[in-house]
Image (cartoon, grey):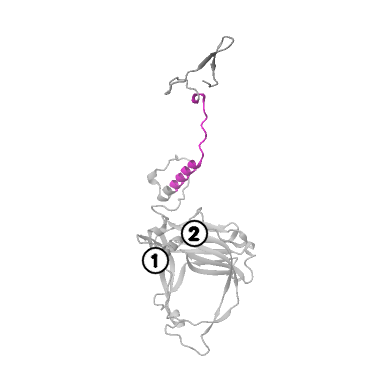
Amino acid sequence: MAIIDTLPAVNVSVQLNNSFRDSYEYPDLTPYPRERYLGGVERVARNYIESQEGTEFCIHVNVNDEPSIDPWVYNEHGLLFFLYIDGIFMGKRFCQNKDFNRGDWHFTFSSRKHPNEDRSSLVESRFKFQSIVTVDDEPTHGDFRRARDLGIIEVKVKLGKASAMTTCRRRRNFERDFREPAVDSFLIPEEALKGRPIYHGTSSVAFHFHTSLFNQIHSFTAPEILPGGPPRFNSFKTVTGALLATYTFKYRSKGNPEPMPQRRSVRFDEPYTVPRFEDLHQYEIERLARERLRQLRDEKLQTPSLKKRTYDDYCDLTQIDEQPVRPYKIIKMRSGHEAIDLTGGY
């Protein structure tokens, strides 16, 4: 469960459908691009979670009715929650003051709704972890963009305001081409991943078809032109405001190699052992290599200290010289004593 200290009333969590509790979370300390938040106060929660092949999951959002959210949730003002998985928008929900029930508001993102290929019915598909298959193809710009956001579940909280119900006219054309985002495509060039330890993406498994309801409301022939123009419908709109908080979950597989840290309890009775190089995972080897390269670079930039000269550097006490020693000039003083001339004028 991710909770931001400056926004304690809101908590977001990811739950695997094969478990009755929230998934384990590990802090994500990697650098990330900064964004502009309301009031210049950054409200961010970044964590790792464990992903399992073929496991369905859902995202829980819970808001407690506390005085800390009163400046943002009142009358027609509220909080807008936007869900992005692998960089693709999956849905949004609006939390207003009237929506609180017994002191809290909660919603679960577990699926997405979209038309099928021939647009004959609506399909509701649950979120599921799916393995990624790397290929040796030349990556395109789209592959790099997709790999950049792969393996990330992100919930953005923004300020919202409900506008009045408006009556609009809209002409529906069900014969136009419809393209779904490539959420179930897991063939990606290996070069696009750039060595990142990502082995899972999010797919969707269809479990229900709204065929009868969809066929009753929509016709797949050319729209009939009715007197008075296209039919009217009521539209509920929300105005999106400033960014309030961001909750990010990077899902990583638990296997070999291990891309996420291990939860390990320390026992003080067991001796300390240094791990072998063969037992290290690839991401640990790369981290150690970067640290060693940085250490060598720092040592190279440091200026070497000057060597302190000693008496031996000026006078050879061994009397073993490669070059013949220049004889001294001995002069005789008036007092009769002999002296060595050090003036160098000889």
Q: Could one spot residue 340 in this view of the protein?
A: yes
The residue positioned farthest toward the top in the image shown: 336
Q: Residues within 10 Å of mark 2 (few under 14, many from 20)?
A: many
> Which residue corresponds to the image point at 52% horizontal and 87% vertical from the top-left?
229
**Residue 20: x and y, percent?**
47, 60
Instruction: Name above or below for residue 236 compared with residue 196.
Output: below
**Residue 291: x and y, percent?**
46, 46
In the image, residue 298 lies in the stretch drawn in magenta: yes
**Residue 67: x and y, percent?**
64, 62
The residue positioned farthest toward the front in the image shown: 346
Q: Which residue is mark 1?
A: 185
Q: Nearer the viewer, residue 47 or 320?
A: 320
Left or right placement of residue 140 versus residue 244 in this view: left
Label 1 SS: loop
Q: Could one spot residue 52 in this view of the protein?
A: no
> Which residue corresponds to the image point at 52% horizontal and 69% vertical from the top-left?
92
Which label sits on residue 249? 2
Instruction: Name above or below for residue 326 compared with residue 229.
Output: above
Instruction: Name above or below for residue 270 compared with residue 142.
Output: above
In the image, residue 49 lies in the stretch drawn in magenta: no
The secondary structure making up most of the magenta span is helix
**Residue 308: x and y, percent?**
52, 30
Label 2 SS: strand
Q: Nearer the viewer, mark 2 or mark 1?
A: 1
Residue type at numbered disc 1: Ser
Q: Marks 2/1: CA distance?
A: 21 Å
The span shown in magenta is 287-313
Q: Nearer the viewer, residue 175 or 269?
A: 175
Q: Image quarter for residue 145?
A: bottom left
Residue type at numbered disc 2: Phe
Number of numbered labels in the structure image: 2
Q: Earlier in the sequence, mark 2 or mark 1?
A: 1
